[in-house]
Image (cartoon, rainbow, N blue to C red):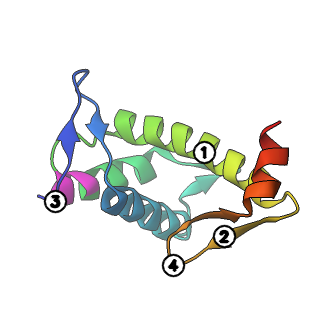
Amino acid sequence: MEGSSISRNDSPIWSDAQLEYLINLLFQQSRLPGMKSSSNLKGKVYRAIEQKMMEKFGPKFTTEKIKNKLKSTKAYHNICKQILATSGFGWDPTNKCVDVDNEVWAVYIQ
């Protein structure tokens, strides 16, 4: 199993590879016919993703843990989206991070 560790409260600490795998699974599953109701994914999608995550990374990647990770990831995504929509901010695809001049950053955090 690829490197995941477990924190004190028995929640997985997600590696970049695990998160990337989860996102790819979500994308694949959401494109299958009948996997969405309205704009939400159906329960069978989460069960399928849970099975694949457990096969690849171990038993700690339950549907509950996956949904919790998606909630926190969505919050981070919204913050990044807001920052990147601000003038002077860009994305560095090589380092996979926000790129901004120090002066622009200083004004932004004030």
**Residue 35 vertical placement versus 61 (above, below):** below
Q: Main secondary structure of the magenta part?
A: helix
Q: Amino acid at mark 4?
A: Thr
Q: How far is mark 2 from mark 3, CA to CA?
A: 28 Å
Name the residue at 73% across, 57% down: 102
Q: How far is mark 4 from mark 2, CA to CA?
A: 9 Å
Which-is-in-front pick, marks 2 and 3?
2
Q: Quadrant of the C terminus?
A: top right
- Residue topped by disc 2: 91
In front here: 36 or 54? Answer: 54
Q: Amino acid at mark 3?
A: Glu
Mark 2, other Cα within 10 Å: few <14 / some 14–19 / many ≥20: few
Q: How far is mark 4 from mark 3, CA to CA?
A: 23 Å
User: Looking at the rendered structure, which numbered label has been put on residue 2?
Assistant: 3
Whole-percent x and y of residue 26? 48, 60
Q: Earlier in the sequence, mark 1 or mark 3?
A: 3
Answer left or right for 98 relative to 49: right
Whole-percent x and y of residue 52? 26, 59
- Residue topped by disc 1: 76
